[in-house]
Image (cartoon, grey):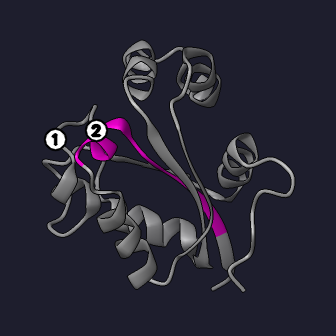
Amino acid sequence: MAIERTLSIIKPDAVAKNVIGKIYSRFETNGLKIIASKMVWLSAQEAGEFYAVHKERPFYKDLVAFMTSGPVMIQALEGEDAIAKNRDLMGATDPKKAEAGTIRADFATSIDANAVHGSDGPDTAKVEIGFFFPGMNVYSGR
């Protein structure tokens, strides 16, 4: 396995529930290091650009509206097989189908308000991390 980086977003629903620390603890106890983080309230333009890959999908407008409904916590994670590890920690997109003990099973309320976002592959992770943390804003955990 290789050391990877991935992007994670704690979405407005989970931020509003005040569970950032609980989610960070799951990252850290599972071998993921937080190497960059910031809290932001995304504009419609920022959320639209970030989720542009979904622009033609029927849920795009609702997704942008949700992601701009409150502050989000954005972090870059680093660790062995970080992308797959984070996706396992998140659980299925639909919290009703997520395994017990996953972030979405424990903190999400619906397929739309599903608590977290995570990169789905190495190329996506690189683009997503660069979108939110350009240049010198990421610090290796090593």
User: Mark 1: which amino acid?
Assistant: Thr
Vertically, is 72 above or below 7? above
Q: Please give left or right for residue 22 compared with residue 64 in the image.
A: left
Which picture quadrant has residue 21? bottom left
Viewer-nearest of discs 2 and 1: 2
User: Mark 2: which amino acid?
Assistant: Asp
Span colored in magenta: 5-17
| Contact between labelled residues 1 and 2, with CB atoms less than 8 Å apart | yes
- The reply to whether the magenta stretch includes residue 13 is yes
Q: Residue at x 72, y 86 (%)?
A: 142
Which picture quadrant has residue 3? bottom right
**In front: 64, or 18?**
18
Vertically, is 32 above or below 75? below
Circle 2: element type: helix
- The reply to whether the magenta stretch includes residue 54 is no
Image location (x, y in percent) of residue 86? 45, 66
Circle 1: element type: loop
Vertically, is 114 above or below 82? above
Image location (x, y in percent) of residue 94? 23, 43
User: Dividing the image into 4 quarters, which one contains the N terminus?
Assistant: bottom right
Q: Residue at x 43, y 28 (%)?
A: 67
Q: Mark 1 points at which residue?
A: 109
Image location (x, y in percent) of residue 24? 40, 68
Q: Name the residue under label 2.
A: 13
Q: Residue at x 62, y 16 (%)?
A: 45
